[in-house]
Amino acid sequence: MERYVLGIDAGTESIRSGIYNEKGECISFAISENANIHRHPGWGEQNVDQWSSSMLESIQLAFKGCRVRPEQIEGVGIDGTSCTVVYLDQEGKPLRDAIMWMDIRASREAEDIAACGDDALKYVGHGKVSAEWFPCKNLWVKRHERAIYDQAHTIFEHTDWMAYWLTGEITANINTVSIRWFYNAKEGGLPVSLYEKIGLGDIFKKLPKRVVSIGEVVGGISKKVASQTGLREGIPVAGGGADAFIAVIGVNALKPGKLALITGSSQLHIGMTKAELHAPGIFGTYPSAIIPGMEVVEAGQISTGSIVKWWVSNFLSAELKQEAKQRGIGIYALLDEKAAEIPPGSEGLIVLEHWQGNRTPWVDANSRGVIRGLTLKHTPGHIFRAIMEGVAYGTAVILQRMAAGGVFIDEIIACGGATKSDLWMQITADVVNKRIAIPEEQQATSLGSAIAATVAAGIYGNLNEAADRMVRMRKFIEPNPENHEIYREYIYQYEATYEHLKDDSRRLVSTLG
C-alpha cells in the first residue's frame, strides 16, 4: 500500500504544495500566488498574513480532484525563502511585513559587520558580507525601526514561521541559522562575540531557543490547521530549511563533486564537501547545514529568472505576442526559437545580471544590471539569449572561485524554471563546460521537503536513504567544446564589465538615498 507525505515549498512568487508517495512520485501539485512589495529600489517585502491564506489555499487545492485524502498524509515537510526575516509580538502576531531575502537595504550595515573583524566572518571568506543576511537586516531594523525591534518577542525566518503556523511551536532550523546567521553547530551555536561587536548583543532573548535539524520532528499538526485542511491532528511536521537548500535534497546532490543548480527568480549553487574550507568569493562552508557531519558550500546569483520575466513583461513587442498567439505557443517558447538562431555570444552582447546587486562572488549590493554592446542589428531574440548567457557567465565565474577554494565539481544537477528551456541548459553546459543532469521531478524543492517528511514520519531512516529511493534523473546535457571556446572570451568580458563599472555603480546608487 502506498504511503503519502506533503511537501510545502514557500517561494518568492508563490506557495506550492505537493503530495508525494514514498517512491517520490508526485500525485498532485498546487500553487497559490504571493505578492511582493517594493517600496524603494533594492527593497523587497511580503505580507505575513498573506502567507497564511496562500499556504492554506495551496494545501486545499492539492487535494482537490486527487485520489489521496488529507487523512492519508503521514508527515509534512516545509521550506521557505532565506534570509526572509519575520518579527512577531508576544501574542505571535507580525509586527511588520517580512523583509524578503532579496532585500538589500542593509548594505551599510553589511559593511559595518564586515569591518568588525570577528572570526565568524570566515563563512564569507573574511570578505564582504551580503546585505541579505540575518544580522544585517536586524541591525538595520534596530537602527531605523527601533520600536519594531524593541517590541519583537520572536525574530526568526520564513521556514520557522511556517513551522509555527502548522504546529504552534517556536523553533529555528539548523539550515537557515547555519547559512545566514553565522551559526556553527560544532562551535556552540551563534557567535556571541560577532553579535555583541555589531550592537546586537540583546537579540538572543528574541531568538528561538530550540534549533531543529532537517527531517527532525518539530511538532504535530495543530488542531486549528487540522480543521482547516483535513490533515490529521498530530502528524509530524519535519524540520525544514531554505528552499534552495532543501532542493539539494530533492535532486540528490548530497555527495562531494555534485553541484545543485537551483534555478528560479534567483539561482543558487550548492555543493557538499567533507572538509571545512573558507575562501573569498564563496559562502561557507557551513557545518551540518543539510546532512549531519557534512560541510556545505554555497554561491548564488540574486537576479536570474526574474530578469527574463522582467524583460518579457515590460519590453516585448505586440508583434511577437501576436505571433506566439497565432502559432498557439507560449511567448517563452517563441523567444527560445529565435534565440536558438543566434550564435553564441549574441553577436557581441554582454549582460551583467546584477538587477538586484551581486550575491557572489563580488558580494556587491551596489552593483546594477548592464546590457552592453547593443547595435541596431540586435533584436529581442538577441537580448533574450544574452540574458541567458549572462546568467551562465555568472555561474562560470562562481565555479572558478569554488575551484580556487578547493571545491571541484564533476556534474551539475539542475532544477527549477530554467530547466524548461533546453536552450538555456545547453548554453549553461557550454559556458561552464560541465555535464548537466536533469531530474525527473522538477519540483525539486517540494520533493526535498517531502523527503524530509518521510524521515519525520519514519518511512525512511535518514535523508540520504530517502533521496536515493525517491530521486531519479530524466536526461543529461553534454557541453559543446567549440561553443565553450567561444564563450571563454565572453566570460572574460563579463568579469571586465563588472570591474570597470563597480565604483561608478556605487557612486550612482549612493545618490538615490
Image (cartoon, grey):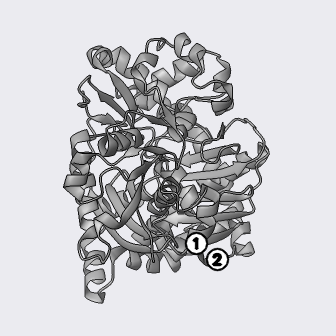
Question: Quarter of the image holding residue 364?
Answer: top right
Give the number of the disc on residue 438.
Answer: 1
Say whether residue 214 is visible. Answer: yes
Q: Amino acid at mark 1?
A: Ile
Image coordinates for residue 269, horizontal then vertical, percent = 60, 52
Category of crowding for the residue at label 2, using alpha-carbon neighbours closer than 10 angstroms: few (below 14), some (14–19), many (at least 20): some
Instruction: Measuring from the top left, give residue 115's x and y in whole percent.
Output: 60, 17
Instruction: Give SS at disc 2.
Output: strand
Residue, disc 2: 476
Work out whether residue 329 or residue 382 is closer to the camera in this orientation and state it: 329
Q: Is residue 107 visible?
A: no
Q: Answer with mark 2 or mark 1, whichever residue precedes in sequence.
A: 1
Which structural element holds mark 1?
Answer: strand
Q: Gap in Å between the C-alphas at discs 2 and 1?
A: 6 Å
Closer to the camera in the image, 412 or 66 = 66
Q: Is residue 481 left or right of residue 205?
A: right
Instruction: Please report the residue visible at 35 percent of the width from the left and 21 percent of the height from the top.
Output: 141
Image quarter in which the C terminus is found: top left
In the figure, 156 relative to 402: above or below?
Answer: above
Question: Tag 1: Cα neighbours inside 10 Å, few (<14), some, or many (≥20)?
Answer: many
Are discs 2 and 1 less than 8 Å apart at CB? yes
